[in-house]
Image: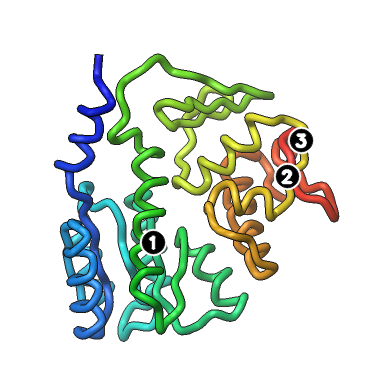
Amino acid sequence: MTTLKEVMNDMIEEKSKIMVVDDDHEIREVISVLLSNEDFDIIEAESGEEALKLLAANIDLIILDVMMPGMSGYQVSRMIRDRSNVPILFLTARTQNSDLVLGYSSGGDDYLAKPFSYPELIARVKGLLRRYTVYQGKQIPKRKSEYIEWNGLRVDCCRNMAWKYGKELELTSTEYRILRLLLAHPKQIFSAQNIYESVWEKPFFSTDNNSVMVFIRKLRDKIEDDSRHPIHLVTVWGKGYRIE
């Protein structure tokens, strides 16, 4: 039987690998030093093209600048999503709602506005990694699967997998966490604030409503036969969302 001490030792021994993508050498250097001091392994890329060449299965998180010459961060994110569900943290000086929606729509998991504080960067990185390692089933003792099933949808809470009528769904960690939350409480209404604070684990502000809407739309695209007329994940106008 795997003990808690053994699990914690594995977590300490296995360093998370983070790719920092920014055309600004000074920003890359600052971030690399900060995260290296937190015992992360760092890979640097000065462009989207280089990042795609360096992308590997063992990268645990990508910090991605939005405004870069050549390929933008949004373009890079879409191409990464074709190959990987690795979490993406956007760095951006553009914080209008439309920019944030575009970032989430392109596959981003979180964003950090420039200029950013060093403690906040570290906190965001650790929060994303914590959720991602749980989603991927890393650093968790093997145990009997625990399923939640409702109306053709099924999630395995131990292996962090999901199916629709027996067909496995390709979900990002954020999409999976939203589905698991709602599926565990069928027919219960969850407001955008309920979802955001449960999944993102951060305080909710009115601007975060758009973030939730984007991920609900992305999740519907994967679990509904016709996302324009959902039958599984429905909107309760003025209140929130629920699983039928």
Mark 3: secondary structure: loop
Q: Please state which of the two labelled residues, at mark 3 or mark 1, is closer to the viewer.
A: 1
Q: Amino acid at mark 3?
A: Gln
- The structure residue drawn at horizontal position 17% and vertical position 63%, both measured from the top left corner, is 42
- The structure residue drawn at horizontal position 37% and vertical position 49%, both measured from the top left corner, is 85
Looking at this view, is 106 or 15 the one in front? 15
Looking at this view, is 28 or 152 the one in front? 28
- Would you say residue 82 is visible in this rendering? no
Mark 2: secondary structure: loop
Circle 2 is placed at which residue position?
190
Badge 3 vs badge 2, beta-carbon distance below 8 Å = yes
- Please say if 76 is above or below 83: below
- Cα distance between the residues tagged 3 and 1: 31 Å
- Would you say residue 39 is visible in this rendering? yes
- Cα distance between the residues tagged 3 and 2: 6 Å
Mark sitting on residue 188: 3
Looking at this view, is 207 or 7 the one in front? 7
Please state if 49 lies on the left or on the right of 154 as rendered: left
Q: Amino acid at mark 2?
A: Phe
Q: Residue furthest right?
A: 238
Please tell me which of labels 3 and 1 falls first in the chain.
1
Circle 1 is placed at which residue position?
123
Please tell me which of labels 1 and 2 falls first in the chain.
1
How many other residues sit within 10 Å of disc 2, few (<14), some (14-19) or many (≥20)? some
Q: Please state which of the two labelled residues, at mark 1 or mark 2, is closer to the viewer.
A: 1
